[in-house]
Amino acid sequence: MRHADAGYDEARQVAAERGVRIPMPHVLGSDISGEVIETGELCERIKPGQRVLLSPGLSCRQCEQCLLGLDNQCRRYHLFGSVVDGGNRELLAAPEYAAIPIPDDLSFESAAAAPLVFLTAWHMLLTRARMEAGEDVLVLAVSSGVGMAAVQIAKMFHCRVIATAGGDAKLAKAKELGADHVVDHYKQDISAEVKRITGKRGVDIVFEHVGEATWQKSLESLASNGRLVTCGATTGYDANVDLRFLFSKQQSLLGSYMGTMGELHKVLKFVFNGTLKPVVDRVYPLSEVAEAHRRLENKEQFGKVVVVP
Ligand SMILES: [Zn+2]
């Protein structure tokens, strides 16, 4: 399979956060697209020559959770590039169920920038936080993969989106993506801006993945009956909650991890028909993968960094 790939930062982060030991040497890369070179004799659906992307999540397909369609809660759920080798390579073997054909007009680079982040954002907003049309949504760190996905999904459901980013260039890109309001999280007070924009009410949903650095401001930004949904803790996991506000304002704190195969198929429909657009920050040849990592570590990217073998 020839492919392009991105998304390694999220997978590595999640594995580290869960205390998972990663066997070394290790090949990174959770989001994978490419052409099928060869299929096994039991494959019925996928044929050689097809252009596909791969589900980043793999599961046992036999346990109660898997058979209920909750495969991201399978005890054997794992990601390409996390505890098993990922896609930063020229050839890769994958189970047939993970392969999803992509339309001819979708480039491998865009396809590789889609699955993990759109799936994660979809599961967070729709399944966990039960987002409804017209709600107010605060999306933190919109320049991240999940951030750019969340803004687009929330706008697709006609929500009002307040997005945070660092620096004017990223704020401008957040507006281009559809954010109604932008907040510079380095220069402005996030919750004060949210209160100003919403007329002191706060937002219905806070889309969290930053963790310790923004947690307090995220809680302060929540309206009554608000839902805070989080899929990560990039800046640290030691957070406090003032229980008086949690119960009296009837708020919900929700954890979220990836999403199901069914949800992946659902959200990809909107990627394939062009409604949701993967944001590719930059494409590197695989030989320059170290440079691609430096770009992520220096927080220079807006969207996904893709490598092509
Ligand atoms: Zn299972």
Image (cartoon, rainbow, N blue to C red):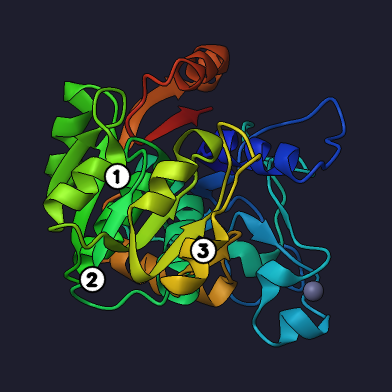
* Quadrant where ligand 1 appears: bottom right
Mark 3 vs 1: CB contact within 8 A = no
Residue visible at 86% across and 37% down in the picture: 21
On-image quarter of the N terminus: top right
The nearer-to-camera label among 2 and 3 is 3
- Image position, residue 106 (x, y; %): 31, 52
What is the CA distance from the residue labelled 1 to the residue labelled 2?
Answer: 17 Å
- Left or right of 277 in this view: 25: right
User: Which structural element holds mark 2?
Assistant: loop
- The answer to which image quadrant residue 70 occupies is bottom right
Q: Earlier in the sequence, mark 2 or mark 3?
A: 2
Q: Amino acid at mark 1?
A: Ser
What is the CA distance from the residue labelled 2 to the residue labelled 3?
Answer: 24 Å
User: Which structural element holds mark 1?
Assistant: helix
On the image, numbered disc 2 is attached to which residue?
135
On the image, numbered disc 3 is attached to which residue?
244
